[in-house]
Amino acid sequence: MAETRKDPRTRKDPRRLFEWSKRRRGSFALWAFALAVLPAAAPQAPAPVAVLETVKGVFEIQFFPADAPTSVAHLVGLLEKRFYRGQRITRVSASLVQFGDPQSRDMTRRASWGSGGSGTRIGVAEFSKRTHARGIVALAHPGNAAAADSQLFILKAAVPSYDSTYTIVGRVTTGMGVVDRLAVADMIKQASIKAADQPF
């Protein structure tokens, strides 16, 4: 009596099913196999975008969570708590604009601006292959990138010497003209997070 062959589709080994599909059904079977066995790719979450309204206008920062996940999560948490609202620009030079010190809300403490933060260090340096070009947003730090906290700087011009020295967390996507006009003591009236239209 001839042996009864079992249909490979009843087995739970996807490799056997794949080989059987190639022999029996051609390209249509391969397509069906992919739908039935292979997991669907998870949609990529949109990159968070910060919207900062200053006395000179509005600019937006798109963060890079894939490059600096711990740093971006820290900053997004601060923005959701409205940490940056009411702060002032603490440093301006030909190449950058810096902010993120809550002491800047107090004009009588201007001599100390740039030395404060949220009180929670990020604890890790997250360097990437990105370069410090115009529009890049990075974390300021006191000499150790892992000790960075809430202070950010935006580059108005490329500074290649900063590469692998400061953690890049995002870039300005809208409003670089506003950034160019900012001066020390200009106020950040509002700062919040919105969802990006597309993943970055």
Image: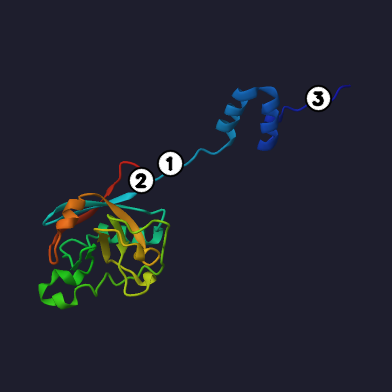
Residue 49 picture location, percent across and down:
28, 50
Alpha carbon distance from label 1 to label 2: 9 Å
Q: Which mark is residue 43?
A: 1
Q: Please, what secondary structure does the residue beneath circle 2 have?
A: loop
Comparing 95 with 33, the one in front is 95
Could you tell me how far apart the alpha carbons at marks 2 and 3 are, in whole angstroms? 53 Å
**Structure colour scheme:** rainbow
Position of residue 65 relative to residue 145, above or below, is: above
Q: Amino acid at mark 3?
A: Thr
Q: Report the amino acid beneath label 2.
A: Pro
Measuring from the top left, give residue 23's x and y in whole percent: 70, 25
Residue shown at the point (19%, 73%) measured from the top left: 113
Residue at 20% across / 66% down in the picture? 93
- Given residues 10 and 99, the one toward you in this image is 99
Instruction: Report x, y in % for residue 17.
Output: 68, 32
Q: Nearer the viewer, residue 1 or 26?
A: 26
Q: Secondary structure at mark 3?
A: loop
Depth order, front residue of 2/97:
97
Is residue 172 depicted above or below 142 in this figure? above
Q: Which mark is residue 46?
A: 2
- Please state the horizontal and vertical placement of residue 154, each as a whole percent of the image: 26, 60
